[in-house]
Image (spheres, rainbow, N blue to C red):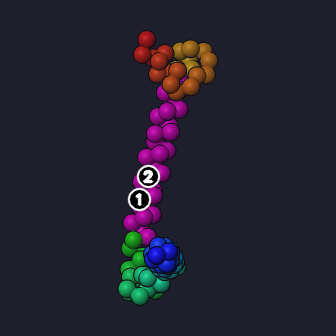
Amino acid sequence: MRVLPLSIILIFVLVAVLSAEGRRHHKRRHSSGTYLKERGLGGLLGGKKEEEKKDKSLLEKLSDQHQKKKEENMTFMEKVKSRTKRAVTKGAAKKLLSK
């Protein structure tokens, strides 16, 4: 009667260990890039260069947007500083200008 619960627990532990091992192996395949190479999507023959170009152009666009936003914030802060004759944070500047 006592053997049955122990065998059930042992089966659950075994299934948990095996599933964790399989998941770890799957993650390792994906992180190393072997999964993509097996599928023919990565490596030297894959069309990665076009994706890299797209990524670079996207990065350039984002950096341009970031720079533009930064310049807008600086001019905004300079306007507030000239009005209040002191440096303030962005939140305080918005409150001051809304009055």
Q: Nearer the viewer, residue 46 or 74?
A: 46
The answer to whether the residue labelled 1 contacts the one labelled 2, judged by CB atoms less than 8 Å apart, is yes
x, y percent for residue 80? 52, 20
Q: Nearer the viewer, residue 93 or 16?
A: 16
The quadrant of the rendering that contains the C terminus is top left
Between the residue at mark 1 and the residue at mark 2, the CA separation in whole angstroms equals: 6 Å
* 72 in the magenta segment: yes
In the rendered image, the residue lying farthest to the top is 99
Residue occupying the point 38% across, 82% down: 41
Circle number at residue 58: 1
Residue occupying the point 41% across, 61% down: 57
The residue carrying pointer 2 sits among few (fewer than 14), some (14 to 19) or many (20 or more) residues within 10 Å by Cα, namely: few
The residue carrying pointer 1 sits among few (fewer than 14), some (14 to 19) or many (20 or more) residues within 10 Å by Cα, namely: few
Quadrant position of residue 49: bottom left
Q: Nearer the viewer, residue 86 or 24?
A: 24
x, y percent for residue 97? 45, 17
Q: Is residue 62 above or below residue 25?
A: above
Q: Is residue 44 visible?
A: yes
Q: Is residue 82 left or right of residue 40?
A: right
Q: Amino acid at mark 2?
A: Leu
x, y percent for residue 31? 51, 75
Residue occupying the point 46% across, 39% down: 69
Q: Amino acid at mark 1?
A: Leu
Magenta stretch: give its range.
52-79
Quadrant position of residue 60: bottom left
Q: Is residue 65 left or right of residue 92?
A: left
The tally of labels here is: 2
Q: Secondary structure at mark 2?
A: helix
Residue occupying the point 52% across, 27% down: 90
Residue located beneath label 2 in the image: 62
Q: Is residue 48 above or below residue 93?
A: below
* 68 in the magenta segment: yes
